[in-house]
Amino acid sequence: MELTDKPELSLVIPVYNEEANLSELIRRTLAACDPMGISYEMILVDDGSADNSAQMIREAAEKNGGKVVGVFLTTNFGQHAAVTAGLRTSVGKYIITLDADLQNPPEEIPKLVEKLREGYDVVGTIRENRKDTFFRRWASKTVNLMVRKLCNGKTMTDYGCMLRGYSRTVVNAILQCPEHGKFIPMLAMSYARRTIEIHVKHADRMAGESKYNVWKLIALCMELAGHYRNLMLSALPGGTDLLTGTSIFPLRMLTYIGTLLAAFGILFGLYIFVMTRIHGDDWSQHGVFTLFSLVFIFMGGQFVAMGILGEYIGKIHMNTRGRPQFFIESIAGRKQK
Ligand code: UDP
Ligand code: MG
């Protein structure tokens, strides 16, 4: 394949501290794509990794001239921003996104290509026997439920799986959306004409740990409801810009504190319930304690509500400012256009 030729297929893979998975990922992906006889590019987006990932991507791009393209972001912008950067760089007629940790087996790529060639705009996937922790699965269920509610009508079974195929039309539509915090699978659905879902295998994360901890998942849920981390920057009145401009922590704290308070209230209520069963109504001062527990629950609820309002305000503020969602530092493995 000539370097200047436009490949037919673009693979977009976000990479954040995946040095332990990269060589295997590249090897298996190339092995899965080569026999298809399709021209393709494998775009690895380094999302500001702190480990050796960027260097490994650079080397792979040099070695597999034209097939492996490295996109290097200036710092960690998050999975969906990294994917967006990859989409922006891609030139293929068909685009497939997948994760770098080999939870989405690259061997499934031909199945998606087949469907894209049949003319589907979005090819979703359903994970067979999901290999994730209980907590991750539960979180994913909640996300799927929210998305389904938000997308009224058009729906997919499994939104968590990043192994997905898109047509160029849909990708262009996604790229034209200026808002931050795009949840790509959902956005794609809203522009697609023909969609289909296929079953794919799901494996354990090959190495390393999930980059999603509890807080990142909460952030993802916030995004889904139309919020985004970066949009929180300087959501507070002037002067506090330094505090809020470097971190969203102050505003997010409202949600965290609220959740904790409410949880405490509920636990306290349960405790009172049990104790009054054992010691009788006198133990709870005839309802005074119960009142405390209720106050905690409602106070917590109010904090959470304020936190959510803050997310909206922050989003409006950041979108008004219109700062770019990511910065590409350099691209390796492709001739300068
Ligand atoms: N990722 C990223 N930036 C981040 C977090 C994750 O590019 O800030 C990438 C990560 O390298 C992986 C994909 O997004 O390729 C999914 O992350 P992970 O496997 O940790 O999530 P999970 O499988 O638990 O949903
Ligand atoms: Mg994973």
Image (cartoon, rainbow, N blue to C red):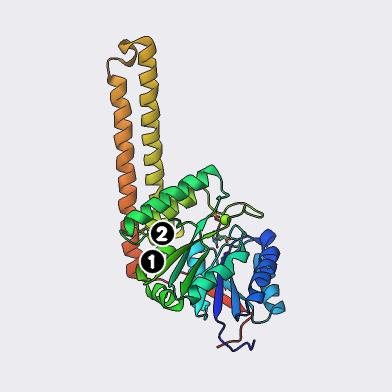
- Tell me, for residue 336, which label it has, or none: none
Q: Quadrant of the N terminus?
A: bottom right
How many other residues sit within 10 Å of disc 1, few (<14), some (14-19) or many (≥20)?
many
Of the pair 178 and 3, the residue shown nearer to us: 3
Residue occupying the point 36% across, 35% down: 262
Q: Is residue 36 left or right of residue 181?
A: right
Which element carries disc 2, helix, strand or loop?
loop
> Label 2: which residue?
156
> Residue 233: where, in percent of width, then height?
40, 60
Report the amino acid beneath label 1: Met
Of the pair 12 and 308, the residue shown nearer to us: 12
> Label 1: which residue?
189
Q: Is residue 55 left or right of residue 128?
A: right
Residue occupying the point 40% across, 28% down: 267
Which element carries disc 1, helix, strand or loop?
helix
Above or below, 249 relative to 54: above
Above or below, 211 relative to 61: above
Report the amino acid beneath label 2: Met
> Residue 9: where, in percent of width, then height?
55, 77
Residue occupying the point 31% across, 12% down: 281
